[in-house]
Image (spheres, helix red, strand yellow):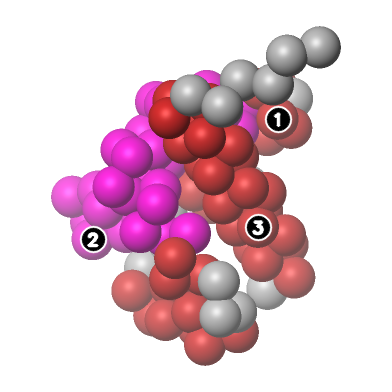
Amino acid sequence: MMIDASPLAGMQRSLRQCLSHMAALLYHHGHVLETVSIPHRGLDRQDVAHLSRSSSEWQTCEKVLVNSEAASWNEHNRLVLTPLGRELLFDMFGEGAADCA
C-alpha cells in the first residue's frame, strides 16, 4: 500500500485531526457537534476563549480550520463549519454529526 504524502493529503489529515480534537473538546464541555455544524449556531467568542484555555491545541486547530476554509466566523460572530468542514465531519462521524435533526 502506498502512502499519499502530497500536500493535499497532509492538509486533509491535519483537518481531520483538528475536527476530531474539536469534537472531543466540544463533548467534554457540554456541546454537541451540531453547535458548529449548523450555520446559524456556532461557538461565540466566549466559548472559543474557554476552549482555548482548556486545551493548548485549540488555537492551532482553530487556525488550521479557518485558514483551510473548513470553518469561519458567521454573521453573528460565531465559529461554524463551512460546507467543506461539514463534509469532512460527515465523512468522519456519520450523517447525524453534520445534519440538523
Whole-percent x, y for residue 39 in the image: 37, 39
Label 1 belongs to which residue? 92
Which element is circle 1 on? helix
As drawn, is 84 to the left or to the right of 57? left
Label 3 belongs to which residue? 21
Whole-percent x, y for residue 28 in the image: 75, 70
As drawn, is 96 to the left or to the right of 86? right
Which residue is at the front of the view, 20 or 39? 20
Residue at x 63%, y 25% (from the top left corner): 90
User: Sequence order check: which comes first, mark 3 or mark 1?
Assistant: 3
Report if the CB atoms under discs 3 and 2 are less than 8 Å apart: no
Nearest-to-viewer mark from 2 and 1: 1
Which residue is at the front of the view, 58 or 12? 12
Label 2 belongs to which residue? 77
Whole-percent x, y for residue 24 in the image: 72, 60
Is residue 51 on the magenta stretch? no
User: Sequence order check: which comes first, mark 3 or mark 2?
Assistant: 3
Residue 22, picture quadrant: bottom right
Query: Above or below — where is 89 with respect to 45?
Result: above
Query: Where the C terminus falls, by quadrant?
Result: top right
Query: Above or below — where is 66 with respect to 96?
Result: below
Residue type, numbered disc 1: Met
Nearest-to-viewer mark from 3 and 2: 3
Residue type, numbered disc 2: Asn
Residue type, numbered disc 3: His
Q: Which residues are magenta?
A: 61-90
Residue at x 33%, y 40% (from the top left corner): 68
